Image (cartoon, rainbow, N blue to C red):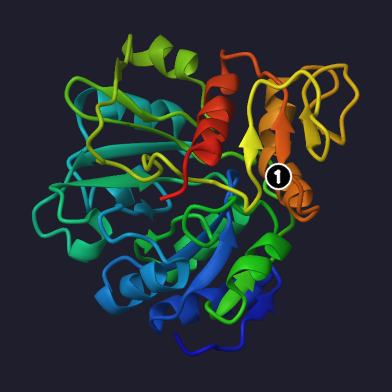
Amino acid sequence: MTEIETRVLRPDAAGIAEAARLLGAGALVSFPTETVYGLGGDARDSVAVARIFDAKGRPHFNPLIVHVPDLDAARRFADISGPVEALAKHFWPGPLTLVAPLAEGHGLSPLVTAGLDTVALRVPAHPAAQDVLRVFDGPVAAPSANPSGRISPTTAAHVLAGLAGKVDAVLDAGPCPVGLESTIVGGTPLALLRPGGLAQEDIERVVGPLKTAGDTITAPGQLASHYAPNAAIRLNANAAHPGEVLLGFGPMQSDLNLSVTGDLIEAAAHLFDHLHTLDAMDRPIAVAPIPNCGLGRAINDRLRRAAAPRT
């Protein structure tokens, strides 16, 4: 891939307008959501979508999330009904991605869905993302803006560190407040396809128990090795071994701590930023145990994938 100059845009009216113009011209624009920074391209343009895969080094059998500004826009691309509709009405905009059957005449590039008859859709809550989507007025495919399998970006600096020279622009609106990718739900009956920034318990209060996803890849973020730093990761560590750096949780001595007070929301917001910082130390990373409840399930999911054997 030929390197290009990556511009940094401000989240003001001029920056939003330029981001939308670039998307309309088939360019790639990274923009913040409440979860992580996404790498956006026009979801109807197969060349733009192919550039996303190329920039990330992403396997083409891994589908992408399509971002839209509201439920009405989502209905142009998918059949949203039943419990999926109930979740959309309850949690959108927000950190929830819903997988639904493709609508007739949807117009999306087949690369977005990886050949499946379903599409993953999300309505982000971040004001900059909303502004871009509304000015662009089209569906934006936007996986996390990082090299495939590596740590997800929660700041514009993270995006530039991984993808400078491969994307046309980054809209810098500061750090992402949630800091953990969206929860993904879909299928019949509904299954939790990826834990994320919306707790499973909150979803089940609306639609009842979710089944567990199988091994088939039907949504983004289901690869066994994913979200990984360059350094090796050891999980459930109560202390660091010689030569390791320790990522702590709760009141303990550590090199960095996800949340000294044991707050899982704070821990989720800090996870990827702290992994980026520790990875730069070029030492193996030990990670303290994280409670497997609420957002802890999503944090542990990301840590297990980060620690998995690399593919």
Nearest the viewer among 103 and 14 is 103
Residue 45 placement (x, y as % from top left): 28, 74
232 versus 196 height, above or below: below
Q: Is residue 278 left or right of residue 1?
A: right
Q: Is residue 108 visible?
A: no
Residue 115 placement (x, y as % from top left): 15, 55
Nearest the viewer among 29 and 284 is 284
135 versus 74 height, above or below: below
Seen as rendered, the residue at the extreme left is: 104
Q: Is residue 80 visible?
A: yes
Nearest the viewer among 117 and 91 is 117
For badge 1, the amino acid type reads: Leu
230 versus 213 height, above or below: below
Seen as rendered, the residue at the extreme front is: 242
Mark 1: few, some, or many residues within 10 Å (few <14, many ≥20)?
A: many
Q: Quadrant of residue 156?
A: bottom right
Q: Please give the name of the residue rendered at 33% of the width and 59% of the height, measured from the top-left corner.
A: 59
Q: Is residue 311 left or right of residue 119?
A: right
Q: Quadrant of residue 35?
A: top right
Residue 58 placement (x, y as % from top left): 39, 61
Number of callouts: 1
Q: Please give the name of the residue rendered at 36% of the width and 26% of the height, measured from the top-left corner.
A: 87
Residue 304 placement (x, y as % from top left): 52, 31
